[in-house]
Image: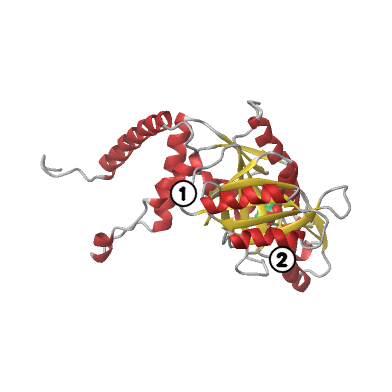
Amino acid sequence: MTHASEPDNSLDSLDRRILELLNQRCQTVAETIQADPTSTLPDAVGQAEARVAVDADLEAAGLPVLSVSSQKSILRHIVSACYQANRPSRVAFLGPVDSYSHLATLAYFGDAIALSPVSSIGAVFESVAASRLGDEGGCDFGVVPIENSTDGRVVDTLGRLAGGDVNLTGEVLMSIHHNLLSSGQRETITEVHSKPQALSQCRRWLADHLPNARLVETASTAAAAEAASKTIGIAAIASLPAATRYGLNVIEASIEDNKDNVTRFAILGSKNPPPTGNDKTTLLFQVEHRPGALADVMGTFKEHRLNLTWIESFPEPGKPNEYFFVVEFPGHRDDSAVADAIKTLAQEIRHVRVLGSYACGRKV
Ligand SMILES: O=C(O)C(=O)C[C@]1(C(=O)O)C=C[C@@H](O)C=C1
């Protein structure tokens, strides 16, 4: 029983008020999208997460409060659902579901976005490129691994970035904990299946604990889990959600060699995100065959005081001695130092392309 003057704080009443507010929020999102048609779901998630704070008064009074990470996770899903109700979008990622790319997709876009699991990194690029060309079967966004803390770059992704015309529109960094999964017991394991990056991130553990097992490369960790569910004797290195989905035993959890194992995933899209105040830019370029050509390019970054945070080179397929370079530095292509540097480089070198300027990623 509540008195008329007291708010009804029963769970039933609170839930009704929350749902009412959510529907109001959905309508406000409709107006916001109408006023700014360039706004995207990732921008909206970033803006909502920036509002997260712990209520210090409640905390000081010793009352239970939602943690920052719970608030972020709840808000991400609310933003995702409101956005999807107004402007549905679809995201392609390396599947099947419960791959790490899938988990990164949910962490970045929330769980209301439409999902399109595909069987290779190349297919993610093709899906985003198709949407860019107006194909309604394509995806507005893609999620691909670009770098990890064990082996550095993910070559398939860099190769595709060099060849295609999709943009980088964001990034998300995810802690990766690998698990050895099997439908039988440890003694029955003769083969360990996984994506090459996952096998590499666990190579010391595998050499110490399963030195006689044959290592078999698969298209993704989730594809390996699927294979392990069909044959006793095959173990997979994959995520815990994959273990649940395929009914596999967790023979051993967290078998990654580096306990701070992180993979950075790139978000592919076709738009150019506006500056947020905490951005980075990724550039792809090729230099002439002459002494000092690369040093000249580095000189341009130095002159504009751009601090490189990542540099990779990789060969151009089919062209001996021709290399692509990828570099990253803080700043947005609309910042004057970045814009001037790009202008200078475009005059000096053979090929330069801004792969994207986008908000620096958060670790999830
Ligand atoms: O196979 C997966 O589950 C993926 O999402 C790909 C991928 C990768 O290639 O880096 C992602 C994170 C882990 O490092 C292992 C595999």
Work out whether residue 117 or residue 46 is closer to the camera in this orientation and state it. Answer: 46
Name which residue lies at 62% across and 49% down: 342
Q: Earlier in the sequence, mark 1 or mark 2?
A: 2
Q: Would you say residue 14 is visible in this rendering? A: yes
| Rendered-image quarter of ligand 1 | bottom right
Q: Locate residue 134, reporting x and y percent.
A: 64, 26
Q: Of helix, strand and loop, which one carries label 1?
A: loop
Q: Is mark 1 within 8 Å of ligand 1?
A: no
Horizontally, is 324 left or right of 306 in the view?
Answer: right
Question: How packed is label 1: few (under 14 Cα within 10 Å), some, or many (20 or more)?
Answer: some
Q: Of helix, strand and loop, which one carries label 2?
A: loop
Name which residue lies at 37% across and 53% down: 52
Report the amino acid beneath label 2.
Cys
Disc number placed over residue 202 in the picture, else none: 2
Indicate the quadrant where residue 45 lies: top left
Q: Residue furthest bottom?
A: 208
The residue singled out by tag 1 in the image is: 276
Inter-mark Cα distance, 1 to 2? 37 Å
Indicate the quadrant where residue 313 lies: bottom right
Report the amino acid beneath label 1.
Thr
Q: Locate residue 351, reporting x and y percent.
A: 73, 46
Which tag is nearer the camera, tag 1 or tag 2?
1
Work out whether residue 275 or residue 305 is closer to the camera in this orientation and state it. Answer: 305
Name which residue lies at 74% across and 71% down: 204
Q: Are marks 1 and 2 in contact (CB under 8 Å)?
A: no
Horizontally, is 3 left or right of 263 in the view?
Answer: left
